[in-house]
């Protein structure tokens, strides 16, 4: 696939044309933060952000997602509800794209979720290199600071122009339709590689071991007192999971009209940090304490998702580190503490 360049001024005019013809979601400045939102004008777009409050997967897995509608009277009938429309997400960072790769494995692997799949296939992804990483991010040490090859177009800011890597035939179509490009010169590709390398060196948080060792570290840590130390401070508020790009759990509920004739079944984002999440019909709770739930969350991120779907469940974005009011949600802090204490406590 080609690598091209476009002048910044030309790129922003192209975005205006994209917005006229498509539903485009991009990053907007929402002082003091940044957030993905629907773009109405090219001036709203901000590509040199550090992090968005919520990840872009809200467009693939909306917080409330209708699944089926049904009639109960005069006859029972059920219709699946699959909502998708052609969409462009503009300005995704590499760690969030790694998270989408994991969502793809979860929702389009052995069990295909038709709602997710329909939205995913209708979504074009235009990403951008994060050259000034966020204070709380540790993506470089999770191996997620550079993009996996599932993008349509990928931008790198070279100063007066963007270097654009085309990653798919859809990306090629977008490039032909909207962008004014020239083939990239070798020197520009080398400049991109240097900018990327410099950005990797700017991360301030990092794991003390390689990300691949996390499952092994966790294997020996079930009884570590760290879980109690952190868990007893937990409010079970769920903020750490609500901002996480790899959290995929949901509840399914029915909404029925007052006359009991029609209804809708929908899913709703849920959190394993909520007390009610593990409660079953008999009233028992599999993870009754904050300690149980916090440990489960960090095992799921660092071990269970890898074993089930082949990707670690943490991409190191750092959103949970910032979101937790009592400063206990950080995977990098927990895994580094476990590395330090690995030899001091008995295994499970
Ligand atoms: S666990 Fe925290 S750092 Fe890891 S992906 Fe989720 S929000 Fe980001
Ligand atoms: S770890 Fe922090 S953010 Fe997560 S549920 Fe507990 S208190 Fe809330």
Image (cartoon, grey):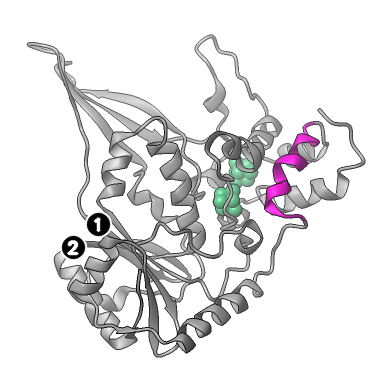
Q: Is residue 98 magenta?
A: no
Where the C terminus falls, by quadrant?
Answer: top right
Please provide the residue range marked out in magenta. 209-222
Instruction: Determine if the C-beta at disc 2 is less than 8 A from ligand 1.
Output: no
Q: Secondary structure at mark 2?
A: loop
Instruction: Determine if the C-beta at disc 1 is less than 8 A from ligand 1.
Output: no
- Given residues 101 and 44, the one toward you in this image is 101
For disc 1, the marked residue is 87
Considering the whole magenta stretch, tell me its main secondary structure.
helix
| Marks 2,1: beta carbons within 8 A | yes
Q: How many marks?
A: 2
- The quarter of the picture where residue 174 lies is bottom left
Q: Is 60 on the left-hand or right-hand side of 256?
A: right
Q: Residue at x 51, y 70 (%)?
A: 50
**Disc 1: CA contacts within 10 A as few (<14), some (14-19) or many (>=20):** some
Q: Is 46 on the left-hand or right-hand side of 23?
A: right
Q: Residue at x 86, y 50 (%)?
A: 340
Counting residues from the N terminus, which is met first, the one under dot 2 or under dot 1? 2
Q: Secondary structure at mark 1?
A: strand
Number of the label disc, if any, that sits on residue 8: none
């Amino acid at each position: 696939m080609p690598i091209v360049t476009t002048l910044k001024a030309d790129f922003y005019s192209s975005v205006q044309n994209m917005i006229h013809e498509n539903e485009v979601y991009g990053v907007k400045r929402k002082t003091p933060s940044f957030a993905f939102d629907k773009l109405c004008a090219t001036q709203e777009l901000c590509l040199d952000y550090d992090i968005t409050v919520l990840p872009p997967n809200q467009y693939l897995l909306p917080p409330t997602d209708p699944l089926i509608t049904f009639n109960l009277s005069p006859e029972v009938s059920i219709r699946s509800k699959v909502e998708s429309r052609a969409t462009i997400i503009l300005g995704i960072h590499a760690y969030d794209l790694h998270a989408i790769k994991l969502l793809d494995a979860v929702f389009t692997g052995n069990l295909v979720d038709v709602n997710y799949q329909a939205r995913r296939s209708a979504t074009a992804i235009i990403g951008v290199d994060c050259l000034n990483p966020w204070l709380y991010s540790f993506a470089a040490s999770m191996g997620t600071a550079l993009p996996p090859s599932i993008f349509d177009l990928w931008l790198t800011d070279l100063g007066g122009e963007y270097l654009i890597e085309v990653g798919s035939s859809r990306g090629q179509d977008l490039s032909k339709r909207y962008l004014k490009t020239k083939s990239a010169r070798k020197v520009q590709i080398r400049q991109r590689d240097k900018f990327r390398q410099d950005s990797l060196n700017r991360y301030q948080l990092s794991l003390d071991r390689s990300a691949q060792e996390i499952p092994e570290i966790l294997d020996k840590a079930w009884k570590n007192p760290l879980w109690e130390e952190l868990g007893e401070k937990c409010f079970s508020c769920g903020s750490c999971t609500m901002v996480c790009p790899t959290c995929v759990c949901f509840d399914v509920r029915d909404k029925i009209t007052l006359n009991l004739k029609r209804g809708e079944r929908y899913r709703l984002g849920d959190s394993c940090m909520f007390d009610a999440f593990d409660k079953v019909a008999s009233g028992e709770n599999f993870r009754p304490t904050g300690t149980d739930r916090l440990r489960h969350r960090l095992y799921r991120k660092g071990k269970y998702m890898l074993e089930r779907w082949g990707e670690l469940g943490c991409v190191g974005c750092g959103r949970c580190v910032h979101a937790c009011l009592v400063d206990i949600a950080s995977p990098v802090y927990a895994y580094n503490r476990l590395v330090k204490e690995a030899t001091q406590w008995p295994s499970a």
